[in-house]
Image (cartoon, grey):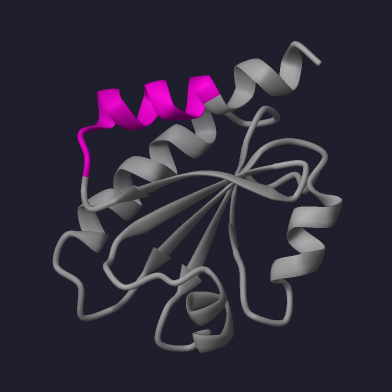
Amino acid sequence: MPAESLITVTDATFASTLAEAGAPVVIDVWAEWCPPCRPMAHVLGELAEEFRGQVLIGKLDADANPATVRDYRVTSMPTLLFFTGGVLTGTIVGARPKSMLRQALANAVTPYVNR
């Protein structure tokens, strides 16, 4: 798993990020023009530090990476895509409070740890 707690993901690096993570992965699909994306990015940055080593959080710019956006049928931003073992296990669409995001990350870690 990369040492960074928050990484940038692109169409070109998406598959390898999932394959090499060694932990659950959450991809934040965002856009520059999306007003709720900025506060979500700040919260996710804080949570990335809190969950360092347990969950890898990646940011994917929707406008610059249309293939991944199309493949996962993302139509609204922000969208969080949750992956375990490279398989999509959940989605959150829209801005959410930090407490809810913390719980979603904790839930993503729990089944992975209990394997």
50 magenta-colored: no
In front of the other: 1 or 22: 22
Q: Quadrant of residue 29?
A: bottom left
Horizontal and vertical percent position of residue 92: 35, 46
In front of the other: 47 or 68: 68
Q: Is residue 105 left or right of residue 10?
A: left
Q: Is residue 115 above or below residue 78?
A: above
Image quadrant containing the C terminus: top right
Horizontal and vertical percent position of residue 54: 67, 27
Q: How many marks?
A: 0
What residue is drawn where x is 23% and y is 53%?
Answer: 94
What residue is drawn where x is 75% and y is 50%?
Answer: 86
Q: Is residue 85 above or below residue 69?
A: above
What is the span of residues highlighted in magenta in the rendered image? 96-107
Q: Is residue 10 left or right of residue 102?
A: right
Horizontal and vertical percent position of residue 78: 30, 61
Q: Is residue 74 above or below residue 103?
A: below
Q: Is residue 76 left or right of residue 36?
A: right
